[in-house]
Amino acid sequence: MNPQKSIAQNINELCFTMGGQLQREFSTLFIALFGKKGIHQQVVTYLGGSKSGLFSADEISKKFNIKSDPLYTTLEELEMAGFITKHNRYGRKKRDAKYALSDPFSAFYLKWMAHVSSQELLENSNYWQFISSSQSWISWSGNSFEAICHKHILQIKQALGIAGVYTQTYYWQSRGDEKKKGTQIDMLIERADKTVMVVEIKYYNQEFSISKDYADNLRVKVESFREEDKSHNSIMLVMLTTYGIKKNSYSNMVNCDLGMDVLFGVN
């Protein structure tokens, strides 16, 4: 990184110029860690190429026509190396877990670098400056923020004042039916003291203001979970946003308001 240049200029130089230091880093990294055999790189590419983000071992197995034992070895190695994260679904057995890409550079490379042609780079010396101001970048940043939050569970627990409480983290979803819509909770922290914390993650470029519609959606999530779950005495709603939530007539429904500073220990 050149301290004399902006972050955008550094990214452009490292990733989007011919011969940039990170241009070939993705493939080189997998060869260095796992050798030329195996499907580690292909699995990461598959996980990073879908908007849904979460895949079961069975889905991955069918995609690559590989048996369970070698696949689980690959998934375990990728998880230990920090490339992917396993998400257990609340109320289900461990075999129902799903996997998501969680390595920031891999996600960035697959979305923004992998499909850029040499001709584009030769014709656009400031390629990244154009992309980083696009709506696609803003939307992608929201999904990436959620992935970063999942990599900082310990810091989130610290900020919530439950660092010493035994917890397990899940995702939860309700498929819905003719009477009600399906819904999903991307982070659900189950505490040993019979309390569940429903964590709503939201990326926004300033303080986030909860509107009436957004508040109604949050209530649906919490009540849908409450109807299905019978084992907890208390449910708390947590908002984890980039810059916190703005105080208004709906903000009181939130039990805990956290900003992204808690992820990195910034006071």
Image (cartoon, rainbow, N blue to C red):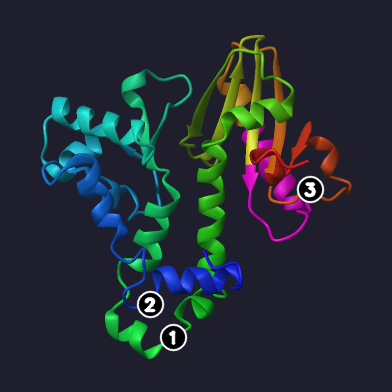
Up-down relation of residue 145 to residue 20 (above or below): above
Residue identifier under label 1 = 125
Q: Is residue 214 magenta?
A: yes
Q: Position of residue 28 (x, y in %)?
A: 24, 54
Sequence-earlier tag: 1 or 3: 1
Marks 3 and 2: which is nearer the front?
2
Query: What amino acid type is highlighted by mark number 1?
Result: Ser
Disc on res. 17? 2
Mark 3, Cα crowd under 10 Å, few <14 / some 14-19 / many 20+, is many
Query: What amino acid type is highlighted by mark number 3?
Result: Ile
Label 1, label 3: how far apart the Cα atoms are: 38 Å
Residue at 52% in and 37% down: 151
Magenta-tinted stretch: 201-222
Q: Secondary structure at mark 3?
A: loop
Query: What amino acid type is highlighted by mark number 2?
Result: Thr
Q: Which quadrant holds residue 63?
A: top left
Residue at 44% in and 85% down: 125
Disc on res. 245? 3
| Residue 66 visible within the image | yes
Sequence-earlier tag: 3 or 2: 2
